[in-house]
Amino acid sequence: MSFVFTPPPVPAVPTAGGGSFPVHRIYCVGRNYAEHAREMGHSDRDPPFFFMKPADAVLPVAEGAVGEMAWPGLTDDLHHEVELVAAIGSGGRDIPVEQAAQHVWGHAVGLDMTRRDLQAQMKRQGRPWCIAKGFEQSAPIGPIHPAARTGVLRRGAIMLAVNGVQRQHGDLADLIWSVDETIAALSRAWLLQPGDLIYTGTPAGVGAVRRGDLMEAAIEGLGGLRVRVV
């Protein structure tokens, strides 16, 4: 095949133990922790809903490194949202909940960065959130840990601090819709494929960051993710 220009490289995330995970799509689950749903003014038992980020929105950060996220344009209110990320290794459609874990290659710590002011504006106008969620470097992510090593993650602390001050803290057991249920729901709407990343939702405590701030996120069993806003 002859391209009219050189295609960009495939977005990829390092994996714990070596190698890289090629990214196909990024799916995100909205308001999937009860306290966060309430802090955003919604019921804590709404059905799951989804939005997407482009694959090249990932900002991969190696273990022990500090990633640098450039301040995005058009916002004065950039928010952090720490999330468990499930990396799909084998795809499918209409995946049963009881088989969903078999499709997960691994897990990682991720950040769903949000231009909150633009999101609020889009909500008021009844428009899509793409401009608030799908910008460059809006999906920082640490190394993906193989599920063969970590097992299925159904509980464990999830937290985020900014400049050493804790902002978010919860437990994976508090997910309204479990990772397995989320995979099953997604696969009814899309054909899941190897390389898909699923950002599974954030606990309460989301808030703004400023230039120079250091975000330190962690999930029990997956280590940490450090990103500085520059």
Image (cartoon, rainbow, N blue to C red):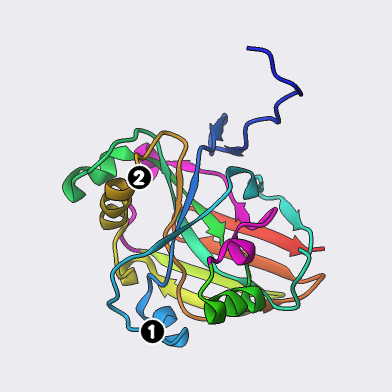
Q: Report the amino acid beneath label 1.
A: His
Q: Quadrant of the N terminus?
A: top right
Label 2 crowd (10 A; few <14 / some 14-19 / many >=20): few
Determine the residue located farthest toward the top in the rendered image. Answer: 1
State the extent of the magenta-drawn residues as a range. 128-155
Check if mark 1's residue and mark 2's residue have beta carbons within 8 Å: no
Q: Report the amino acid beneath label 2.
A: Trp
**Residue 162 percent location from the top left of the image:** 67, 74
Q: Which residue is mark 2?
A: 190
Q: Is residue 43 above or below residue 90?
A: below
**Residue 100 percent location from the top left of the image:** 25, 45
User: Is residue 58 among the parts visible in the rendering?
Assistant: no
Q: Report, in whole angstroms, how far the alpha carbon at label 1 lies from the one at label 2.
A: 26 Å
Q: Is residue 60 above or below residue 153?
A: above
Q: Nearer the viewer, mark 1 or mark 2?
A: 2
Q: Is residue 130 above or below residue 115?
A: above
Is 43 on the left or on the right of 168, as rendered?
left
| Residue plotted at (35% across, 37% down) | 148
Secondary structure under the numbered disc 2 in the rendered image: loop
